Amino acid sequence: MGWIRDRMEDLEPPVQSLIELAQRVRKAQSWPRAERIKESSLATYLGKFDAGEALEWLEQRPGALQALAEILEMTQEEAGEQLSQLQPPRSSSGARVRLRDVPVRPMDLRRESLPPGIPVQVRDPATWPLWWQASSGAGRTLTGQWLEARGQALFLQAETWAEAVRQLPEQGAVYLVLGSAEGAPLQATWPSGLKLCVATDAPPPRPPEREVERIPREPRELSKASGSRRPAPSVWLSVSSPDARSVLRELLEWVDERITVAGFDREACLRWLETPDILARVDTLGTALGFIGLFATYGKKGEESGLAKARSAADLARLFLRLRLQQSESVEVPFDLLWQRLQHLGQRLLLESEDPGAEVRSMDAWLSLVRMRPDDADLEWLKELERQGLKVDRKSLDKLQAMLPADAFRVVRSLKELSLLRERQPQQLAFQPSWMLAGLIEQALLETLDQGPLAWGNVLLRQEHAPAVFGALLDRCRCGDFTLARAVLQAPDTRNPAWVAALEAIFRVLGLVVLEGNAVPEDLRQGVLRLQRALVVPDAGGLPRPRIAYELPSARESLLVDHRVWYAALLALSETLAPQAELSLDSWCTKPSADARRWLLYMASYRSPQEPRMPEAWLLPLLLLGGRLLDNLGPLAPSSAATPLLLQPERLLRSLQEPEVSLSQLNQAVSWHALGPLLPEYARRRGGDWALCVRKIWAAWLSSSTSDLPSFLYPEEAHAEIFWKYLPPQAVEVLASKRHRHLLGEKEACRFFQAEHWEAFSRVWIEKTEPWGTAPIHALWQRIPAEYVRQAIRAGRPDAHDQMTRKELWQRLPEVFCEEIDALFRQGQWDKALTQVWGAPPSAIPRLLASAKAALEHRGASPPASVIQWLHQMIAQRAPDWSKAWTLLEYLMPPAPV
């Protein structure tokens, strides 16, 4: 019997049961009126409190603790002291841990391994000091519990470095989960006997950037000063968590050994996790375990409920909420009400939040986001007014209470108990897992799309979720559903920013649909062009720009809000219009000209180094569009001006049709890095033959072989395959010459070689009497087929001066060398064979000695003096089986009589 039952017996009159105690506690004057919990549930909790369990429930509800103390005739301090005595000591906690979301047996930290995905160095204090950069959900807390349970390290948690320093011992290993890296030292400031591992989501501290010195100094003084002021290296060895998606198979194997659910199909779970929509949401070890738990709980084969019916991230979020509720007995808000509040939270974040992109928010901010008015907190306020004399209809009030949602405080508290809201900093909470919140926002967005253009236009104006709006619009229009587009055009409101944002979004989306080769109704095309043209804002040069721009960094990560897509949409939607048509390109410019047209094409493809590349699915159709427009644009610009990217492929094809090809012009006129891989397909769609184009380029280079290879033909370029796939054999002979030979070792240029290329290379190798090892071409020696090495050995290659090549080939093809040397010995070509013998590894010496012995016995003729020298060297080096060399030496050169 625990302290509560002891106290129940001491009361006058005694309390007979926990149900009776629960009734008294709920009627206590200090009981918080906003706390709604059934008497039976409270009685269950009281039994747990008596056994020292679920004490965190009371800790989070000081009013309930005060009411309990009142009924037990104790002070709140005395009750609190009883609770503190029931808290288990730190050293006994954490030996067994139950993972929250995945149904596995409790994990014995002293005997079991950590799940995959945690760096090896973190688990081994011998590698510390260590800085583990790991986000929340990466297993930081579990790792600390594991290390402490095994006695390998003390586990500490602190918000700041200053707070952590006050907890550090004098010696031993300490694993520290740090809330903020601010103030963390670059050098070791702790006792020398202390080994420290810091786990936090921030990178390790770095020395501050030195200010540029503006006072002139002598070079000698400057170098001396810079050497003396070089910053000391950081004490921290830094490691990061691997991508959780890369360890899914290993993680599933780990879970499968511990799973408590019957019939769990590990391979089926892996297939589900690797579906694109799920895989994109796996960002941490904790997220991966959560999805595995979802599959194990709701993914049973043949069931029509659960995962089988989940069609969206919101459906998964609903299942995940149910999963968490099944694991918790203390949450008082029912599932349906809690899910309703979470849906409301998604809508508020999408439509009203002042900082929609914030990950961490204060308690007051979360309370505000989940609040739905009126709620039962308002009812409690009315009841308080009733106690002060206000007349109310009590029966109607009680009836209304059953209909009202739970108050915001209880909702947030429930989310905290479910670990959906977790404290990152004091009084600062983050919603986890992040994919669940994203699913709620996605659902809110889909609902908003059906509320009309002004509703989702306002979402666009807030920028944070603009890419998601664009993506949803594009998905619908791709399927031929233009309902949302027609809704925008049916009620023009050019003075309303939300409507303008919606119109410009539809303009971009319809342009992309056309670019992808899908049909758009002509009335929509004409309507959106006309309305968009009325809204453009000219730049300083008179070129059109959209009225609504997107500058929020998180929004600009998406290409859908990029300026290139707007200009691409303009080109695509206006392509079929005649040059003199009302809505033609010239009508969009305040100063129509050939140069203005060139700039429109330029803007559709220009990107800064920080901006993402346009996907091939859009870039290739845009290039084809540029090719079709070339003849209709008139004179574009003087030859000195840069050719827009969209016109470069077409101009390349046309220049290759001319009698003379200038490689220098090709090198400068085409953005090979951006266009290279697309050119073969572009040529095919334009009716050309890329293979013929490339052969003409190689022929142009061969006709002037004294010149260097143009950089766009270099084999190390990412687009090398489009040229080297059609490499003529005669080009190999030139490339194998001493001047260009180094190119054959770049990025395995020879990976494109066919038999005719190797034959051409072999001819040059055999004919050129020069050292081949001076220009390293390791990749070539690793790929050359054995038959061509045999030909070279028979011809005396590698020669006596080419030790480096011989060594590489011996390592790769020892059998080929042994066989060819044996044949040369038998043919009596001793010098040619011994040239290759000198590079033999020790393991080949016994076989070579046996070959030499067999050849000597077979031929009977005296070998050259070089054989004597070789045998003498083998004896001197005590090579393997050197006694055979001794026997052969005695045979060839017996000792003189004494």
Image (cartoon, grey):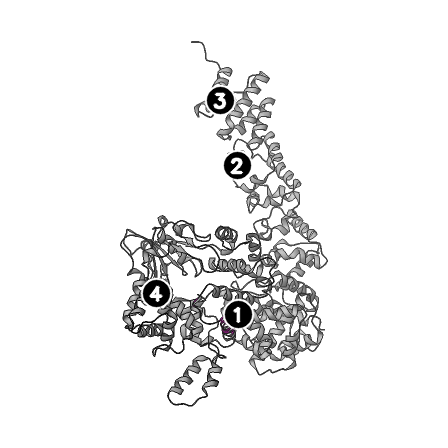
Q: Amino acid at mark 3?
A: Leu
Residue 560, picture quadrant:
bottom right
> Where in the figure is residue 157, as x and y percent of width and height?
35, 60
Residue 356 highlighted magenta (yes or no):
no
Distance from disc 4 to disc 2, alpha carbons, whole Å, reads 77 Å
Question: Closer to the camera, 844 or 189?
Answer: 189
Q: Amino acid at mark 2?
A: Glu
Residue that label 1 marks: 440
Q: Amino acid at mark 4?
A: Asp
Question: Closer to the camera, 850 or 314?
Answer: 314
Which of the two discs, 1 and 2, labels the residue nearer the N terminus? 1
Distance from disc 4 to disc 1, alpha carbons, whole Å, reads 39 Å
Mark 4 falls on what kind of element?
helix
Which of the two discs, 4 and 2, labels the residue nearer the N terminus? 4
Residue that label 2 marks: 808
Q: Looking at the image, is mark 1 or mark 3 nearer the viewer?
A: 1
Marks 3 and 4 close (CB-CB < 8 Å): no
Distance from disc 3 to disc 4, alpha carbons, whole Å, reads 92 Å
Question: Closer to the camera, 82 or 636?
Answer: 82
Q: Quadrant of the N terminus?
A: bottom left
Which of the two discs, 4 and 1, labels the residue nearer the N terminus? 4
Marks 4 and 2 close (CB-CB < 8 Å): no
Which of the two discs, 2 and 3, labels the residue nearer the N terminus? 2
Q: Looking at the image, is mark 3 or mark 4 nearer the viewer?
A: 4
Residue that label 3 marks: 871
> Where in the figure is residue 692, as x and y percent of width and height?
70, 51
Vertical side of 430 occupied by 112: above or below: above
Q: Is residue 520 visible?
A: yes
